[in-house]
Image: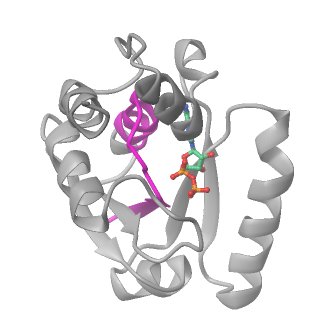
Amino acid sequence: MRRACYPGTFDPLSSGHVNIVEKAALHFDEIVLAVAGVTGKSTLFTLEERTELCQKACAHIPNVIVKSFDGLAVEFAKSHDCKIIIRGLRAVSDFEYELSIALTNKKLEKCIETLFLIPSYRYLYLSSTIIRQVAQARGNLADMVPDDVRLALENKFKK
Ligand code: ADP
């Protein structure tokens, strides 16, 4: 079985993330969306909330499963029999950061490769940071996030 994992913080999952999952799902038998617990960043949503939102948003893709994890993505990949780690690349600005993660992962585990996917152009500008800022200012989140994520954000920032 060709299985890949897509690790990230997903705080929250955006339509760009979903676009990457949909693309990846066409090329693998199974995609494991891996939601990181301790990341060194403080998150708006708890790990349980982020995981549940990912599950809801990916329910329409039959060969995607969602798991949470702590620790190294390569350890997660190995323990779930994933030879490929998927990451998304939006712009040149992502490249340096993603390159250092990919090379570190290669150093840690040489049989795991990183595969970069580029989202459709309409999601290129999206980041979880921008989405949290728009939500906090009660802006229109249409097309930026799946519906359940939008509702969860509206709830978080309700007066
Ligand atoms: P991190 O893993 O650095 O905490 P995220 O959880 O935000 O980052 O994102 C996980 C992966 O998805 C990263 O590879 C990131 O570059 C990518 N990504 C983030 N936003 C988008 C987007 N709008 N379109 C495509 N890929 C994205």
Residue 11 painted magenta: yes
* Rendered residue at 37%/35% (across/down): 18
User: Does residue 21 lie above or below 134 as drawn?
Assistant: below
Asked if residue 16 can be seen in this view, the reply is no
Numbered label tally = 0
Name the side, left or right, on which 127 lies relative to 38.
right
Residue 24, given in percent of the width and then of the height, sits at 42, 43
Name the side, left or right, on which 34 lies relative to 107.
left
User: Does residue 74 lie above or below 35 as drawn?
Assistant: below
Q: Quadrant of the C terminus?
A: top left
Q: Quadrant of the N terminus?
A: bottom left
Residue 7, given in percent of the width and then of the height, sits at 47, 62
Residue 5, given in percent of the width and then of the height, sits at 42, 63
Most extreme residue toward the front is 159
Quarter where residue 65 is shown:
bottom left
Asked if residue 77 can be seen in this view, the reply is yes
Residue 88, given in percent of the width and then of the height, sits at 59, 43
User: Does residue 20 lie above or below 83 as drawn?
Assistant: above
* Rendered residue at 38%/16% (across/down): 141
Name the side, left or right, on which 63 lies relative to 157.
left
Quarter where residue 100 is shown:
bottom right
Residue 17 painted magenta: yes
What span is in magenta?
1-24
* Rendered residue at 59%/76% (across/down): 112
Give the colour scheme of this rendering: one colour
